[in-house]
Image (tube, coloured by chain):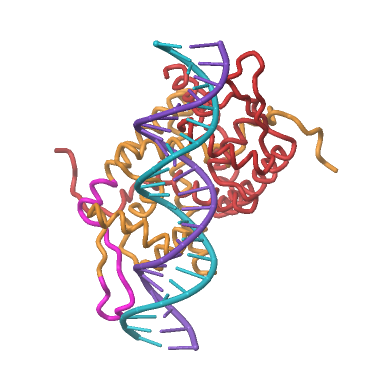
Chain colours: A red, B orange, C cyan, D purple
Amino acid sequence: MTKPRRREPVPKESPGLPGRAVARLAKRVELALGFAELSLPQYRVLALLAEGSAASSALASRLAVSPPSITALVDGLVARQLVERRPDPSDRRRIALVLTDKGRRVLTDADAAVGERLDDIAGYFPPDERMRALDGLRLWHQALDAYRDARVRGA
Amino acid sequence: MTKPRRREPVPKESPGLPGRAVARLAKRVELALGFAELSLPQYRVLALLAEGSAASSALASRLAVSPPSITALVDGLVARQLVERRPDPSDRRRIALVLTDKGRRVLTDADAAVGERLDDIAGYFPPDERMRALDGLRLWHQALDAYRDARVRGA
DNA sequence: TATTGTTATACTCTATAACTATA
DNA sequence: TATAGTTATAGAGTATAACAATA
C-alpha cells in the first residue's frame, strides 16, 4: 500500500489535477458556445469539418463517437444549414459532410465567443503568465492530432 | 471589413484555437472517465465536493447548472453511494451534499484514469514540452477558482 | 459477405415551469 | 412572501442492436 493517508481534500502541494482543469474549462466553453447556439459536440463537428470534408464514418472515428451519434448530430446541423450532406457518386453508400458558408460563419462566431470567455478566465492569471496559459492550450492541438491519428489507424 | 479572405481551412500560422483544444481534450477526458463509470458532469460534482461539502444550491451555482440538474445528477451519485444527502437541522429546507468514502475512492480512480490518458496524449509533445503542457493545464485551476468566485458573488 | 449509414430504443444531462416544504 | 429543493416535462447527445442499401 502506497496510499498515504485518505481523506486529503486535494493534494495541496500541486495546483490541481490536469483532468479536473479540463473538465471545468469544458463547462465554461460549453456556456460560451450557448451564445452561438452550439453544443460542445456540434462545435467539435464544425471544427473538424473546417479542416476538410469527411465521410460520416471518418467523422465518427475521428471524433470518437458512434455512427448513430453522428447521424443525430449532423441532422441538427443540416437542419440549420451549417452542414450539407453530399452523396458520393462513386460509392453510393458513402455521404460526404461539408461545412457550408453559413456553418463557417457560425464556427467563427463560436470561436470568438469561446476565445473571449477563455480570455476572461485567463485574466485571473498573473499578467506575465496570461499569454503562456492560452498558448499552452493551443499547443495541445498537435498532440491531439497525433494521438487521434494513431487511434484511428489502430482502429 | 477586416476579414481577410474567408474559406481558410485553419489559421495556419497559429497552432490552433484554445477553445477548440479544450473541446477536444474534454472528449478524451470523457472517454477516460468511462473506465470509472463516471460522466463529465458527475466528475465535476465529485471534484467539487472533494473540496468540501456544499448545499445543493451552492453546488448548482458553482458548477453553473440549474437546480433541477443538480437534483438529477446527485440522484445518480446517491444511488451509487458516492454522495450522501444530509439534511441541515438548523434550516430544514437545506440539504448538504457530502462525498462518501466510496465516492472519494471512485474520484481518485477517475483522476488516475484521466491522468493516464492525458499523459498518453502529452506523449506526442516534444520531450522537453511534455511536463510543461500538463503543468500548464493544472495552472488553470487557480484562474477558474477566481473566475467562478467572481461569478457566484455577482449572481 | 462486408461496409456505410440510418432507424429504433433507451439512458443521461440539460433547462424551464410548476410545486412542496420551510423560513 | 421568499427561499431551497424536487417533480414534471421536453430536447439534445450518447450508445447498442437491428436494419437497408450498396459494394
Q: Residue furthest right?
A: B1
Count of numbered tags: 0
Q: Residue at x 29, y 54 (%)?
A: B77
Could you tell me which quadrant the N terminus of chain B lies in? top right
**Is A67 one of the magenta-colored residues?**
no
- Horizontally, residue B116 falls left or right of residue C7, namely left
Looking at the image, residue D5 lies above or below residue B1: below
Closer to the camera in the image, A35 or B63: A35
Q: Residue at x 61, y 35 (%)?
A: A47
- Horizontally, residue A79 falls left or right of residue B76, namely right
Looking at the image, residue B54 lies above or below residue A56: below
Q: Residue furthest left?
A: A1
**Is B96 one of the magenta-colored residues?**
yes
- Horizontally, residue B2 falls left or right of residue B28, namely right
Where is residue A43? Give x, y as percent. Answer: 59, 41
Closer to the camera in the image, A113 or A96: A96
Q: Quadrant of residue B4?
A: top right
Can residue A17 be seen here? The reply is no
Where is residue C19? Give x, y as percent. Answer: 41, 77
Q: Residue at x 46, y 33 (%)?
A: A65
Closer to the camera in the image, A114 or B42: B42
Where is residue B117? Give x, y as percent. Answer: 38, 32
Q: Residue at x 33, y 74 (%)?
A: B94
Q: Quadrant of residue A107?
A: top right
Where is residue A17? Give x, y as percent. Answer: 38, 44
Can residue B150 be seen here? The reply is yes
Magenta region, residue range? B87-107
